[in-house]
Every structure is written in C-alpha cells, then in structure tokens.
Image (tube, grey):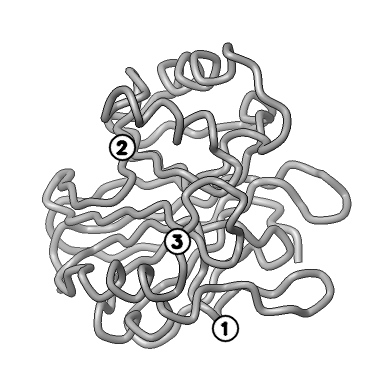
Amino acid sequence: MPLRRAWVWSWKDRMETRVTVISDTHCRHSEIKMPAGDLLIHCGDMFDLFSRTPQRVSAIDSWFGQQNFEQIIVTGGNHDRQIETELAHRSQPLANAHFLNEGLTEFRGLKIFAAAWVPYLSKHAFYKDQSALARIWAGVPSDIDILITHTPPKGILDKSRAGQSLGCPSLAGEIQRISPRVHCFGHVHASAGLQRIGETLFINASSIESGTGRIRQPISFTLSSGHG
C-alpha cells in the first residue's frame, strides 16, 4: 500500500532524536519533499546501475548539504557502482553525509550500524555471496539502536510484485540475535512500509513506488537515546 504521509513512531525516554529514512531514490532525490529533523538516513540506491555520469555523486552530495538535519548517514546499494568506485580512492566519497559501507557509528547516544552488502546480484555493486554475508551479519553487534542495510532480511518486507521473496537469508538468521530497535532498509520497492516484530520496528523505506514510479513520502519516527 502506498505511504501517503510521513509515519511517526515514538519512544519516550531521555533525549529524543527525530529520524527520517529514505531509500532507492535512483537520482530522483530532488522530487522528495523532505522534513527537518536530527538524523537523515539513506539506505542506498542513490543512482542507477547502468546510467552513470561523473556529476551524479556531486549532485546528490550537494542535495544532502541542503537538507535540514544535524547528521546524515548513508549506505550503498546494488545500483551505487559510482560510490563503490569512489571508495577505491577515498573512504568518505561524500562531503555532506557520513557514508558507512560497513561499520558502527554513534549519534546523540544512539548506536547505529550500517552495511551496504546485497545477495544474489553478482554483477551489481556491493555484492557478497552467502558465505561472506553470513560472516558479516554474524559480526553485527547486538546492542545497537538502528541497523541500516540495503537488503531486507528474507521474509520481512521483501516481496516483489510477483510475490518473490528477495531478502537476505543470512541476515534473517541473525536478526533475532541483533534485535535492533529499528531496522531500516529498501531494495524491494513493492514492499515499502513498516512492520513491527517483537521489539524491532522494520522499515522498508523505498522512495519510488513499484510499477507506477510515484514518489513516496519519507518515513519519520522519533527515537530516544534510552531503551526505557
């Protein structure tokens, strides 16, 4: 079902952080009506895989610089080969956002882990096979507040329009152990939305509607720095 407004999910305790999540913008970021907030997350697929121009990285970097957020955290997706190429030369390809290929960061007391890796798509950017993915996901710490990936875990907000489950089995096998408060991802446009399972809020933040190409509203929520 299309998301027709920004969604809000709140935990009330200690410092509250206003978080907005987008994903799979595919060079159409300027069409999204962005709110102001504390933290902006982009879950990858900023670009298109087979249509590249040198200006695209600087264009989205400039757009990030225009957004009204204290911090912007970005990971890659399978279409982001230009970012993958940039990483061969420098660890931070963006000046106005903090890019996390695979790693942990902290913002306003929130522990955040991000990883760009995707299964199955061996000719795309940020691909890893299942054995490598199993090692990566097993290394994700369990005391994090927000997990950012491009791929969904298998079985959670991961079905294509044809009903095929496209998420990562290895990630699904570690999700209960990791138990993040929020898991943000994209990749499968047809399953955009929210699902709460146990203590985790899962968010597929794909910004372009599958089939129609319409732009969806960004998803926003408020998260406290404590677990109370």
Is residue 22 visible in the rendered structure shown here?
no
- Residue 161 position by quadrant: bottom right
The image shows residue 158 at horizontal and vertical percentages of 62, 72
Quarter of the image that includes the C terminus = bottom left
Q: Is residue 73 above or below residue 175?
A: above
Circle 2: element type: loop
Task: Report the Cα–Cα distance between label 3 and label 2.
Answer: 32 Å
Question: Counting residues from the N terminus, which is met first, the one under dot 1 or under dot 3?
Answer: 3
Q: Nearer the viewer, residue 139 or 180?
A: 139
* Residue 2: percent from left, percent from top: 75, 59
Label 3: which secondary element: loop
Residue underneath mark 2: 38
Disc 3 residue type? Lys
In the rendering, at what x and y percent does residue 130 appear? 44, 74
Query: Which residue is label 3 attached to?
Result: 128
Q: Secondary structure at mark 1?
A: loop
Spatial CA span between label 1 and label 2: 31 Å
Q: Nearer the viewer, mark 1 or mark 2?
A: 1
Give, as a three-letter code, the residue at label 2. Asp
Residue at the image point whose x is 25% and y is 77% from the top: 178
Q: Earlier in the sequence, mark 1 or mark 2?
A: 2
For marks 3 and 2, the one nearer the N-term is 2
Identify the mark at residue 66; answer none if there is no mark. none
Q: Is residue 35 above or below residue 140?
A: above
Identify the amino acid type marked 1: Gly
Judging by the rendered image, the residue that carries numbered circle 1 is 155
Q: Is residue 26 above or below residue 189?
A: above
Q: Nearer the viewer, residue 220 or 56?
A: 56
Residue at position x 73%, y 42% in the image: 215
